[in-house]
Image (tube, rainbow, N blue to C red):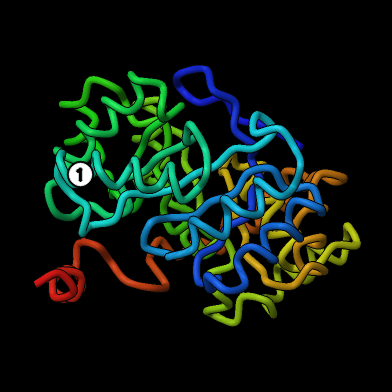
Amino acid sequence: MEYVTLNNGIKMPILGYGVYQVTSDECERCVSDAIKVGYRSIDTAQAYGNEEGVGNAIKKSGLAREEFFITTKVWISNAGYDKAKISIEESLQKLQTEYIDLLLIHQPFGDYYGTYRAMEEAYKNGKVKAIGVSNFYPDRFIDLTTFSEVKPAVNQLETHVFWQQKQACEYMEKYETQIMSWGPFAEGKNDYFNNATLKEIGAKYNKTVPQTALRFLIQSGVVVIPKSTHKERMVENFNVFDFSLDAGDMEKISALDTGESLFFSHQDPQTVEWFMSRFK
């Protein structure tokens, strides 16, 4: 396993297992399979409704808590200091742990300043080892970072070969914040798994398209958390440390970047209205 060192000295695996859209019923089984494959970093969120499954799998693994790196996120409905503070305690209980390795604000909506104050407090109290944000574009990221006492250690963004977040990375590097990818396979959009460039480069190393794409992100310094409910895919996604892409291949994949989301923009008024409509 390769690691990144966050701005507070905490080491984080560069490859983890994500449980977005994994149902609460199957989460425990999936995380247990991932642990058996070798994953030690698990990414969940309050909004996923499966923190309990993650906690159960880790507890039943028989491995020491210190071997794991657990990430979860505070949802919009828990925004604001008071609600966020309560929700952090609830996440700790559901995850059956005394501390969370990385806690993120899930979306840049609601009273995220209040949320961040509650997270800073949890960080200072040792209940959280590192704090950060998710889906914060450069404008809001710079705003929050400028007025925060504890600088965000991580910003989790939609990041894949078709949207490599080059501008965001420039600013995160400036503020010493680690980029973390959600959707490293773009959920198959843009005919991802049949991309000719990724296929050609993968064949050169006897690797699949997903392995090639993950290796590109890892060599670019991006933390990745691919999700699969199938153990054989978990194994495939995990086996990306026995080869390196050469400079020419990195350049070819870099050229696939469109600079645009394949999902939605958090700066689009209709998208923001959709998020807000869920909390009226």
Element at label 1: helix
Nearest the viewer among 101 and 190 is 101
User: What residue is shown at x 22% (from left), y 53% (from top)?
Assistant: 78
Task: Count residues near mark 1 (Cα–Cα under 10 Å), then give few for <14, some for 14-19, many for 20+.
Answer: few
Could you say which is closer to the camera, residue 49 or residue 150?
49
Q: Is residue 270 left or right of residue 226?
A: left
Compared with 138, 255 (above or below) is: below
Q: Quadrant of residue 187?
A: bottom right
**Residue 149 spot, x, y in % from top left:** 23, 20
**x and y, in percent, of residue 242 in the image:** 87, 45
- Quick one: quadrant of the N terminus? top right
What residue sits 79% from the left and 50% below the top? 240
- Compared to residue 279, the image places residue 182 above or below, namely above
| Above or below, comparing residue 267 to residue 156 in the picture | below
Q: Which residue is label 1 attached to?
A: 140
Name, please, the residue furthest toward the left: 280
Toward the viewer: 182 or 211?
182
Identity of the amino acid at label 1? Arg
The number of callouts visible is 1
The quarter of the rendered structure image containing the C terminus is bottom left
The answer to whether residue 84 is left or right of residue 198 is: left
- Residue 271: image x %, image y %? 21, 72
Give me the residue at 44% from left, 59% from top. Answer: 158
Q: Nearer the viewer, residue 170 or 188?
A: 188
Q: Is residue 157 left or right of residue 55?
A: left
For the point 66% across and 57% down, the residue is 252
